[in-house]
Image (cartoon, rainbow, N blue to C red):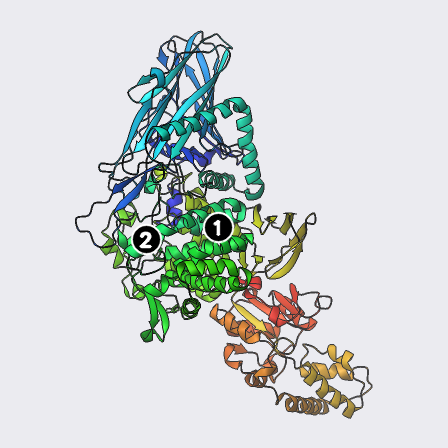
């Protein structure tokens, strides 16, 4: 299904219809068909505890609460089981839920009638982290009340859920009862036909046990039967004036406490509820009374602290925490309220769902639902960690600490997979062991090692925190690098290239292949980084290196092997199609019959046997295209464009991870229309439920992709070797956008509008960034505005002058004219020679003779010009390729690889001979015949003639000149002009650079 088709399914009246001020998610009324989706959207979390956004007064089988550290481990049953298969699966299961307070008016339980006009409003405040509901209810006996609730899951107090209930009588008179519940017994979603949700726990599950000291129910303990993990929940209250409390009472699946009051019109009662969760790791803690006592004390301490602080303080803590996050992470989009709302919604969920203790990370669905059993996948490091590294680096570090803490389990997994050394992280996990029962699309995805290495490398680039790598992450990087030589080899049949076998890449519609392009590219980067880290540690952290090397038996010879493998990695280009093959066989398969596949047969994984899919060219998600992004420094623009075009045609985007990658690369390649379409799908995937499964939980990696789409896509942000680069563009339909970056201890804001880009360094040391290739120095208190120019421009051809642009023939011209002038007895010097730049031979002669008093006939002029040309040819006969300006050959090769046509518009009739001597004549598609041009520069004729010969419209040609006459000619031809030389002289040029070596395609050119 295309992006446009997905977006066409957005229902009128959904969340987009009330984007508000961009800081709220608001739904009016209640629709049972979207109730489970809304529970995901309105979920609250703090990295440890997650509470879905159910509505009081409505029973829901999909509502619930989760703890990041509480999960069951059930056996995986196979009819045919082989060595190394995963033997258990971790499943995050629901825990007891404390968010419900039932309201009873004179014996009538308050409920919510379904319908869009139901007097119920729910609002998630992204600035303060609170979920608010407002419900107006008409009692059967007559009279109405207004019930307002506020809910938060505290960032500052990891086990705390806080609620405030306010009931105001409009014109109701009578008794009111508030029943505050702790509910348990909700089971994990059962296994069905959708592999993305549900599990068969077998004999596993959760046992709940109320805790009744002195026969008074005060808490509930829950224990996972097989993992032995334990959690405990208890609650306490602060009752407002007019409320009286009864003793808690126990029912079959809840502990409840009643609070009573009498209401009269205008009367108000308030009840604040605090619920405290505590948990223990069954792997470390002995089950029994001691554990229960400890958890009871932890929960009691949390409740006591909360009651002493009170609701207002806890709410202020929450708002302050988020204010600090938004100060760095907020993205502003002016021109599309729906996208403004979406990007903040996505960032909010990323922030609140990320583990903060180093023992947990962030699951595919965060803490918002049961999708994918609460597992961590590769997208945690590939999509989510980069966002946090640039906005909340302390959380990115915690995510890496989680992986480091599971290194021993990764080693065990590697041994189970037959590897004698090293570590292989599991495809999907919570505790650290492989949980995927389908190894072709699970355990075979070895690229997860390279993805974690990529995240570690990016974290170091963004933070400069090399000490963390030396002290903590190096062992993980070395152990995971050791796997690649065990799944690949230097292949004599591939010219000695290093090839990798029987793996699966990100595209899960193709499995168990040789030389998956993404895997090879990312493995090469992993190996090179591991080798570089080893070399750096030899001088910068020798003690840490010695400790790690001794512990794991690492030798310099092994590191040398990594470097060799990285340099020799097999990354071919298909000679017929000019694209990167996704694997050795992908391009040989038939293309999937898209025309014969109805829309209701997507996603393909729910309707076709995997083998039927594997036999075709069809991609579930970006694979080669993702390599073009994450390993983009090693690939030229032309290859990126060809790969984008080819693989876009066979990618169905059945994974929510896919659109963001295509959108970012589309922005880099200059296709703003595609970029904004892909970005819109990414940003609104959950709010508009574009994949129809937001009810399982929101899509964390897609949410991360929306931030990447702004910063990496439209902002053009890239980094390498400690340098931060931007190439901003303004998307169609937007008036302005702004985003923040944390970079090596600094805080930076980037704002883009039609007038240009403004960089603001908020804190930290001075910083030099690069804007479209040009250096910009930043300092605190001194914003730098870079005016918008015509570049990068849509271009299909580059047209070069020769003299002074590609080589230096100016001295030869000067000496030849000087010799002729001396023979003619007319004055001439270097200053007069400057005025001849860009002027043809006869025009130059006329200028030399003007004002000299020397008169020549037409024939004598022809003879004099011919004589000068002879002198000049004698001088340039000594030219070789060594006389080519620095950077010219690389520029021409890169331009051709990018699919650009190349031409020369030189006024010199010797241009073909000179280009031949310089060794570059074959790189040009056309060289102008200066003798056939009726009007010389500054007339546009020569540039227009080259454009016609190249069959490219003039506005899509870029002219490059070193003379004012040439710049004028280019501008009159209707082409953008880049001058080489002095900006004070080349005043009509659209941009001026000092030397041709400074010309960067990504700065000046985007595909037309």
Taking 655 as reference, is 918 above or below it? Answer: below
Query: Where's residue 912, x and y in %?
Result: 56, 83
The mark found on residue 412 in the picture is 2
Q: Is residue 982 above or below residue 596?
A: below
Can residue 14 be seen from the camera position used here?
no
Q: Residue at x 78, y 78 (%)?
A: 831
Instruction: Measure the alpha-carbon separation of dots 1 and 2.
Output: 28 Å
- Left or right side of 851 for 269: left
Residue count near mark 2 (Cα–Cα under 10 Å), binned few <14, some 14–19, many ≥20: many
Return the residue nearer the eye: 24 or 308.
308
Helix or strand or loop: what does disc 2 sit on? helix
Q: Which one is nearer the viewer's eye here, 504 or 929?
A: 504
Q: Position of residue 200 (x, y in %)?
A: 24, 39
Relative to the observer, which residue lies in front, 907 or 184? 184
Picture quarter containing residue 619?
bottom left
Along the viewing direction, whichever of 649 and 514 lies nearer the viewer: 514
Of callouts 1 and 2, which one flags the residue occurring earlier in the amino acid sequence? 1
Residue 480 visible to an observer of this rendering: yes
Residue count near mark 1 (Cα–Cα under 10 Å), binned few <14, some 14–19, many ≥20: many
Q: Is residue 215 left or right of residue 261?
A: left
* Residue 795 coordinates in the image, percent (x, y): 53, 64
Q: Residue extending furthest left?
A: 79
Q: Which residue is mark 1?
A: 386
Label placed on residue 860: none
Give percent across and percent down for residue 56: 39, 23
């Amino acid at each position: 299904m295309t992006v446009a088709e997905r977006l066409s399914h957005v229902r009128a009246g959904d969340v987009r219809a009330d984007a508000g001020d961009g800081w709220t998610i608001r739904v009016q009324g209640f629709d049972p068909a979207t109730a489970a989706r809304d529970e995901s959207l309105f979920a609250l979390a703090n990295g440890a505890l997650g509470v879905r956004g159910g509505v009081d007064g409505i029973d829901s089988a999909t509502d619930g609460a989760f703890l990041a550290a509480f999960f069951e481990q059930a056996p995986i049953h196979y009819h045919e089981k082989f060595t190394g298969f995963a033997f258990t699966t971790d499943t995050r299961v629901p825990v007891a839920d404390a968010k419900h307070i039932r309201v009873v008016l004179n014996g009538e339980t308050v409920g919510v009638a379904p319908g869009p006009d139901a007097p119920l409003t729910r609002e998630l405040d992204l600035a303060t982290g609170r979920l608010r509901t407002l419900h107006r209810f008409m009692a059967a006996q007559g009279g109405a009340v207004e019930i307002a609730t506020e809910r938060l899951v505290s960032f500052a107090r990891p086990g705390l859920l806080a609620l405030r209930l306010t009931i105001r009588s409009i014109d109701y008179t009578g008794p009111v009862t508030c029943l505050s519940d702790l509910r348990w017994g909700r089971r994990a979603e059962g296994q069905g036909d959708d592999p993305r949700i549900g599990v068969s726990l077998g004999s596993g599950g959760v046992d709940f046990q109320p805790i009744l000291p002195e026969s008074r129910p005060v808490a509930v303990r829950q224990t996972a039967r097989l993992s032995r993990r334990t959690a405990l929940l208890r609650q306490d209250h602060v009752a407002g004036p007019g409320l009286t409390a009864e003793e808690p009472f126990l029912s079959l699946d809840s502990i409840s406490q009643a609070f009573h009051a009498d209401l009269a019109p205008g009367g108000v009662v308030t009840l604040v509820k605090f619920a405290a969760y505590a948990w223990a790791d069954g792997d470390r803690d002995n089950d029994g009374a001691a554990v229960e006592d400890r958890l009871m004390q932890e929960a009691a301490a949390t409740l006591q602290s909360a009651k002493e602080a009170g609701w207002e303080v806890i709410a202020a803590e929450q708002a302050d925490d988020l204010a600090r996050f938004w100060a760095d992470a907020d993205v502003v989009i002016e021109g599309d309220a729906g996208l403004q709302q979406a990007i903040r919604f996505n960032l909010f969920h990323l922030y609140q769902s990320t583990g903060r203790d180093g023992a947990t990370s962030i699951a595919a669905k965060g803490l918002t639902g049961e999708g994918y059993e609460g597992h961590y996948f590769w997208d945690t490091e590939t999509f989510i960690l980069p966002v946090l590294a640039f906005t909340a680096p302390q959380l990115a570090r915690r995510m890496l600490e989680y992986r480091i803490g599971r290194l021993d389990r990764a080693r065990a997994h590697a041994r189970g997979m037959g590897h004698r050394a090293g570590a292989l992280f599991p495809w999907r996990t919570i505790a650290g062991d492989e949980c995927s029962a389908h190894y072709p699309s699970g355990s075979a995805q070895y690229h997860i090692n390279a993805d974690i290495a990529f995240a570690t490398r990016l974290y170091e680039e963004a933070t400069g925190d090399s000490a963390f790598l030396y002290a903590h992450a190096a062992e993980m990087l070395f152990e995971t690098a050791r796997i690649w030589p065990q799944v690949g080899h230097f292949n004599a049949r591939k010219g000695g290239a290093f090839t990798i076998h029987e793996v699966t890449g990100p595209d899960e519609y193709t499995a168990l292949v040789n030389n998956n392009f993404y895997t090879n590219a990312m493995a090469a980067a992993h190996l090179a980084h591991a080798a570089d880290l080893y070399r750096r540690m030899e001088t910068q952290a020798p003690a840490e290196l010695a400790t790690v090397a001794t512990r794991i038996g690492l030798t310099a010879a092994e590191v040398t092997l990594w470097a060799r493998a990285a340099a020799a990695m097999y990354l071919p280009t298909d000679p017929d199609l000019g694209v990167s093959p996704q694997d050795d066989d992908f391009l040989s398969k038939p293309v999937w019959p898209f025309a014969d596949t109805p829309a209701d047969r997507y996603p393909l994984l729910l309707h076709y046997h995997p083998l039927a899919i594997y036999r075709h060219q069809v991609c579930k998600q970006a694979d080669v295209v993702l390599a073009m992004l994450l390993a983009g420094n090693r690939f030229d623009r032309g290859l990126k464009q060809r790969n984008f075009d080819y693989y876009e045609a066979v990618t169905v985007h059945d994974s929510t991870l896919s659109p963001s990658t295509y959108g970012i690369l589309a922005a880099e390649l200059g296709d703003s229309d595609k970029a904004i379409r892909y970005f819109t799908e990414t940003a609104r995937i959950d709010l508009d439920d574009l994949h129809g499964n937001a009810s399982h939980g929101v899509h964390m990696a897609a949410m991360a992709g929306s931030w990447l789409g702004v910063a990496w896509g439209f902002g053009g942000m890239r980094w390498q070797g400690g340098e931060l680069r931007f190439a901003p563009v303004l998307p169609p339909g937007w008036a302005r956008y702004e985003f923040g970056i944390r970079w090596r201890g600094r805080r930076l804001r980037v704002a883009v509008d039609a007038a240009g880009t403004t960089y603001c360094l908020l804190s930290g040391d001075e910083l030099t960034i690069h804007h479209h290739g040009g250096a910009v120095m930043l300092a605190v208190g001194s914003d730098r505005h870079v005016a918008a120019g015509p570049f990068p421009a849509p271009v299909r051809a580059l047209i070069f002058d020769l003299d002074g642009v590609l080589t230096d023939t100016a001295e030869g011209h000067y000496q030849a004219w000087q010799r002729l002038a001396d023979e003619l007895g007319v004055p001439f010097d270097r200053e007069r020679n400057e005025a001849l730049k860009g002027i043809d031979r006869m025009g130059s002669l006329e200028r030399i003779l003007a004002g000299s008093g020397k008169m020549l006939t037409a024939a004598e002029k022809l003879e004099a010009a011919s004589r000068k040309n002879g002198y000049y040819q004698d001088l340039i006969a000594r030219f070789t390729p060594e006389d080519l300006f620095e950077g010219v050959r690389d520029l021409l090769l890169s331009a051709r690889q990018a699919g650009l046509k190349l031409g020369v518009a030189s006024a010199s009739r010797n241009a073909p001979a000179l280009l031949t001597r310089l060794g570059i004549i074959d790189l040009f598609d056309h060289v102008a015949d200066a003798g056939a041009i009726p009007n010389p520069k500054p007339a546009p004729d020569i540039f227009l003639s080259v454009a016609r010969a190249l069959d490219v419209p003039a506005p899509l040609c870029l002219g490059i000149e070193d003379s004012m006459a040439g710049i004028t000619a280019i501008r009159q031809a209707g082409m953008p002009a880049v001058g080489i030389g002095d900006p004070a002289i080349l005043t009509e040029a659209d941009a001026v650079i000092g030397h041709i070596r400074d010309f960067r395609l990504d700065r000046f050119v985007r595909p037309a």
